[in-house]
Each structure stands twice: as C-alpha cells, then as structure tokens.
Amino acid sequence: MKVRSILFLFFILATGNVFAQMPALERVEPMFWWVGMKNPKLQLIVHGNKIADRTVKLGYPGVKLVQVHKVENPNYLFIDLEIYPAAKPGAFTIAFARPGAKNLEYKYELKARDHAANRAQGVTSKDLIYLLMPDRFSNGDPSNDSIAGMREHGINREKMYSRHGGDIQGIMNHLDYLKDLGVTAIWLTPAVENDEPSASYHGYAVTDHYKVDARYGTNDLYKKFVEKSHSMGLKVVMDLVHNHAGTEGYTIQDMPMKSWVHQWPKYTKSNFRDAAVMDPHASPMDRKIMLDGWFDKRMADMNENNPYVQNFLTQNHIWWVEYAGVDGFRLDTYPYNDPEYMADWARKVKAEFPHLSIFGETLVWSVANQAYFTQGNTVNRGFDTQLPGVTDSQMKEGITEALNGKEGWTDGVNRLYAIVAQDFMYQDATRNVVFLDNHDMSRFLSVVNEDFTKFKSGMAMLLTMRGIPQMYYGDELLMKNYSNPDGLVREDFPGGWPGDKSNKFIARGRTAKENEAFSYVRTLANYRKNTTALQTGKLMQFIPQKGVYVYFRYDAQKTVMIIYNSNEGDAKDLNTDRFNERMAGFTKAVDVITGNPVDDIKNIKVAAKTTLVLELKK
C-alpha cells in the first residue's frame, strides 16, 4: 500500500476491512519494561484486529491497571499501568477477553534495571564523535543484504540511493580502527527499521520504532555493539527522529486516530523556516506550516500535541537507553518539533538517565537562532527547552569563512572570532557539538577546494575549539564531494566490502597523501584525548590582527596555544608580546603535530593558511 497524500490517510482510517487479515493481537509496545523507573507510569499501545472489542485483565503484585483507552480506530487499545516501587522483576499475563471467544494472551515481562557505570554515561567535551552511516561503512554480514518481506530488496552499490549492504557487524569489525584514530564516541544515523520502498537507507523514515532494521542486524546485535564499544572505551550516540515517521509504519498505515499525524486538506510541506518559530512578528500560519508541515511525502509529521503520540515516543526512547545502554541522543530536525513537548520529553529522559547527553540538530543561520533552542532561557524565549546543546552549525560556518574568506571587519577570520565571542548566549557552549561537515552537506575537503593545508588547519581548529568535536566518516582519509545530490557525500568507506579495490582501514591500502591526512588527524585526536586543557580547559581568544587569529586552551596542567594565519601566500612572523597574559612564565613550546621543539616563542613564524598547535613549556 502506497500512501501518496494525507487525504489517503483519512481513507485508510475510514476503511473498515483494510486490516481485516491482521492478526487479532499483532503487537504490544513497549514489548517489556523495567521495575524501579523514576516514572511509575507506563502506557502500552496494543495493536490487533478489532482488539478494542476485548476486555483487558491482568494481575501482578505491584502493578496496577489504571485505565484502558479505546480510540477512534478499533484496532487499538492504550493501556495505562502504574508500576509501584515495590514491584519485583517477573512476568505476568495480560489477557484480552471477549464473550464467546478464546482469550488472547500476552506474556509481559518486567526486568531489573542495569546500573553498570559504563551505561548511559554521557558524551561530553572530553569526547570525539565519529559520525557514520551504517549502510555505507562496512558490510560485515552479507547474509542480511536482502530480507524477504521487506519492500526494498537486495543491494546495488552502483546507485547512490539504493541500499549498499553496510551493517552493524561491519561497524563492530572496525572498532579498533576508530579507537586507533582517537575517536571516543560513535554516532550512527538511525539504525531502526526503515521499510520504505526506496531511498530509506539513511534511516530517517522510521517504520518500526522498536526494531533495528533487519538489513543492519537485530536488536540483540545492536546491544552487543554497544557493549563491545563500551568494553573498548568507546561511547555510542543514538540518532532519534521525533518529528516524522515513515509512511509504511503500522501506526501510519493503520492510524490509531486522525490526530496521530498533522492533517492538511492537501499535502503541505514544511516551509523549513526556523525563524517563524522564534519571530515575535511571525504569521501564525507561517509558524504552523514550519512546525506541522510534512518533511517529505514519505515522512508523516507526528502530532506531538497528541498525548498518545507523546507517550509512544518518550517511552520508546527511554526503552532504548535502558535496553542497550547508549550514552547520548542526537535529536534530528529539532526546530520542527513541538517545543513544549520536547521540553517535557527531555525532563523525563533526564530523570531516568541523569548522565545521558542530548544535543539537537539545528541547521540555522545565526548564533541567536541556535541559542534560542538551548536550555536556560538565555535569549528570553520565555521557557526552558531543557536541551543541553545543539549541533553548532555557526561554528562550522565560522571555520569555513576563516579558511576561505577574505579578511574584513566581520569577514574572514574575524567571522570566526565573532562567533566564539557570542558564547554568552548559551548556558554552556561546551555542550555544543562542533563539526566541519556531515551526511547532509558537502564534505569538508571539497568545501576548502581540496586544499590540503586548509584541510589540516580546519581539523586543527575542530580538535582544539571548545565544545564536543564531531567528524564525518572518511574525512580523515580525504573523502570528498558535494551534497547536490546528497548521495554524493554518502559514498562507501573503501575497504568495508569484500572485494573492494583498496582497503583504507589499513595503512598499506591508503595513498601517501591519505596516510598523511590520517596521521595528522590521529596525532591531534589522540593528543586531545590525553590533554584536559583541550577537553575541559578554559578558552581565551584574541582579536585577529593582520589576518592572524590566536586562542589558548588552558587549565592547571597545560596551556595550548593555537595560531592560525589566514593570509593567502604570505607567511607571518608573529610577535607574541600581546599574548603575555597567557604566555607569562613560558619560555618554549612543542609543536603538537611534529613533536619538534620551538625554542623561541617570542617570535613565531606561521605559514600561510596554516594552524599551529603549540603546547607551551616553562
């Protein structure tokens, strides 16, 4: 069944026999839960053919059946439970009874929580995140390349929008590569099921919120991936999509109620204008279209004002943390969500997992626009979003402008300086995720016109700037391309598939230039991993002069001086007298990249477009 418009969704809901062949009890979600949660309330969503005709019965010490909700669609029941603190782990039967018919039964389990220290531990400015797309990183299990019954079959690596066969086992096979590079956290684009007919390899059109896509593996394998990562000192970030869902999912194909998604008389796409959310002069309709318009015809816009939708999403995300032990959430398309719901969601998630990290995707056009979505009501929004940090697209723009732009009062390297100077807008800017590119934009090497010196300078700034640095897979190997279309920046990692012409996971499979780039990133990343000044140290920056930008990261253990010469073609002899407030007492330095000593730190020569990273010594 292909959903082509929202009007057709009304038809699905109104058609009584569409799901006549559906099992009488198709699913109960969450499939199981845990005792000892901070929030004792749990709402089960039950889906089955005319399940609303049945009466719900259960009995278990410490569990109270509070209410059973019947909704517009008789194929659903929503069951409110309360799980008291005294409840013990165990299983009990939920019976669905109807006169003259055999009871339907579901064995529900309450598990004990796992409080191990390395679960839900949080991703912080001490970490380096490596973003990868499971379908494009490595194929570790060819047996799951094609799954019977799924709408898209097989793989075709010659087509950018087809499935390529990468999977969770492939990632697990190369954790040692990431560890060696200096990565400490792995962010996967969504690994849950995306059973759409085509082009859903990216993961953002979810069709089953509780199931890892079978072409990537199983829920159990995902949990083992997290556990193996943790055993190696690597954290895991899970990518969540609140705003929309794939149209082939059961809650869209057979909606519980019309208000499950945002309905329009005809297909209405979001205007993608985040300013309409924050503009005090905005047209209410502009704001509604921004928030309630669909992201795509195959991505239904979830109605987060609906309390059933709220419970469905929030419980699902809490379930994944407790089940798999992931350490952080990246929240897709954050500005498109209902603000009050997202604040409530964050409060509930933080209550269960106080150390879990959360950051929202905000591809917006000013520092103020970014800060608007962060917690603390720092820009007079009027309420606290409870969102600790965002993807810092403004820092990305600042670094790019510093590398490519011509110096002016607010241009070139001065743009970067001004962006850092606006950190006062955040409650804590170190919770922002700093990046140079990702799966939705042109690769960094192409953005700097394949200039290797600029590439190294940008990487140096990424790994020494405040915040949580994030790399995109393959950047360390000079992967390149532009994002129009986006598939061009989502190429396979060379060596991730049996029979690949080259294996760039190992040094002998890389070119000399690729090895130089890898070594450069590896050196800086591992230095950062062992240098608290770059993780949690303070930052002091100086106004750029003659195109040279200087900032320091420092704490009681170390002081690191970062110098960037933005001039084209001209090396600069930098007299460092004006930096005496941070350099007093130091007499020499070590170049972090080369390991070479710098005996004269009164005058430092910096080549054009080059960033020096110097550890100051006494």
Image (cartoon, grey):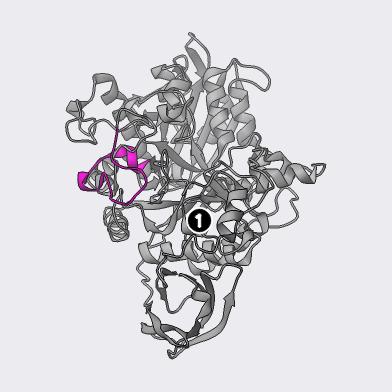
| Residue 45: percent from left, percent from top | 50, 70
Vertical relation: 513 (above or below) 21: above
The 10 Å Cα crowd at callout 1, few under 14, some 14 to 19, many 20 or more, is many
Span of residues in magenta: 133-156
Q: Residue furthest right?
A: 281
Between residues 307 and 586, which one lies in front from this camera angle? 307
* 207 relative position to 517: left or right: right
Q: Is residue 145 visible?
A: yes
Residue drawn 53% across the image and 25% down it: 400
Residue drawn 44% across the image and 21% down it: 446
Residue 471: say if magenta: no
| Residue 572: percent from left, percent from top | 50, 13
Residue 147: say if magenta: yes
* 538 relative position to 265: left or right: left
Residue drawn 49% across the image and 41% down it: 554
Please name the predominant secondary structure of the magenta segment in the image.
loop
Tag 1 secondary structure: helix
Vertical relation: 602 (above or below) 40: above
Vertical relation: 259 (above or below) 91: above
| Residue 179: percent from left, percent from top | 28, 44
Q: Amino acid at mark 1?
A: Gln
Between residues 533 and 185, which one lies in front from this camera angle? 185
Q: Residue furthest top?
A: 569
| Residue 289: percent from left, percent from top | 70, 44
Q: Which residue is mark 1?
A: 253
Q: Is residue 41 visible?
A: no
- Quadrant for the C terminus, please: top left
* 130 relative position to 371: left or right: left
